[in-house]
Image: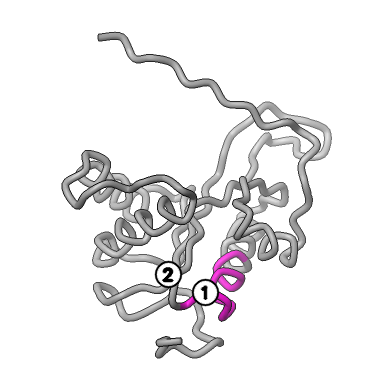
Amino acid sequence: MHSTFSISAAPRPATPDDVPELVRLRAVALAALGVDPGADDAPWRAVAPGWFLERIKARADVHCLVVGGAPGERLVATGMAWVTYHLPRPQYTDGRRGYLDGIVTDEGFRGQGHGRRIVDGLVAWLNGIGIHYIQLHASSDGEPVYKAAGFVPSHFASMDLFTTPAL
């Protein structure tokens, strides 16, 4: 292990200075999922900085946590939570749900509790704004972390539809 961060390193909110590292860690996450993130000039990498910046700076319904150095320094883990809006239902009358995404720990720092601390921090943020129904899609590597945090399989089937954009 080459970690210089203690197991108790608390996650902190991401800042605009962290955006390059958030993009780098996104590529790490994609590779871990078996998706080739492409070269440094891949089109998604040109869009990603603005995507992260908007969510970090301008969206009260999004929260991004990181573990690692000070803003602008190397990060070892990150994760995001945001509010999704759905039809009201008896248990959750305002229709709001939380969604966790982009939780990733750099390869050399896995197994040290960074991901779990990020999950716990994101759940606490959602709970703090009154959201107690939280969803995510788990990779096989992440599933043990989420189960340990109390997540259970959903009774809703997940389905996807990909359409072809008009030319």
Q: In the displayed structure, does residue 52 sit left or right of residue 46? A: right
Callout 1 secondary element? loop
Label 2 environment density (alpha carbons within 10 Å; few <14, some 14–19, many ≥20): some
Check if mark 1's residue and mark 2's residue have beta carbons within 8 Å: yes
Q: Position of residue 32 (x, y in %)?
A: 47, 56
Q: In the displayed structure, does residue 47 sit left or right of residue 116? A: left
Q: Amino acid at mark 1?
A: Arg
Marks 1 and 2, how far apart at CA: 7 Å
Verify whether residue 117 appears in magenta.
Answer: yes
Q: Residue at x 49, y 50 (%)?
A: 33
- Indicate which disc residue 110 carries: 1
Q: Position of residue 78 (x, y in %)?
A: 45, 64
Q: Quadrant of the C terminus?
A: top left
Verify whether residue 154 appears in magenta.
Answer: no
Q: Which residue is at the front of the view, 150 or 144?
A: 144
Q: Which residue is at the front of the view, 32 or 10?
A: 32
Q: Which residues are magenta?
A: 109-119
- Indicate which disc residue 93 carries: none
Q: Residue at x 46, y 51 (%)?
A: 62
1 vs 90: above or below:
below
Which residue is label 2 attached to? 106
Q: Amino acid at mark 2?
A: Asp
Callout 2 secondary element? loop
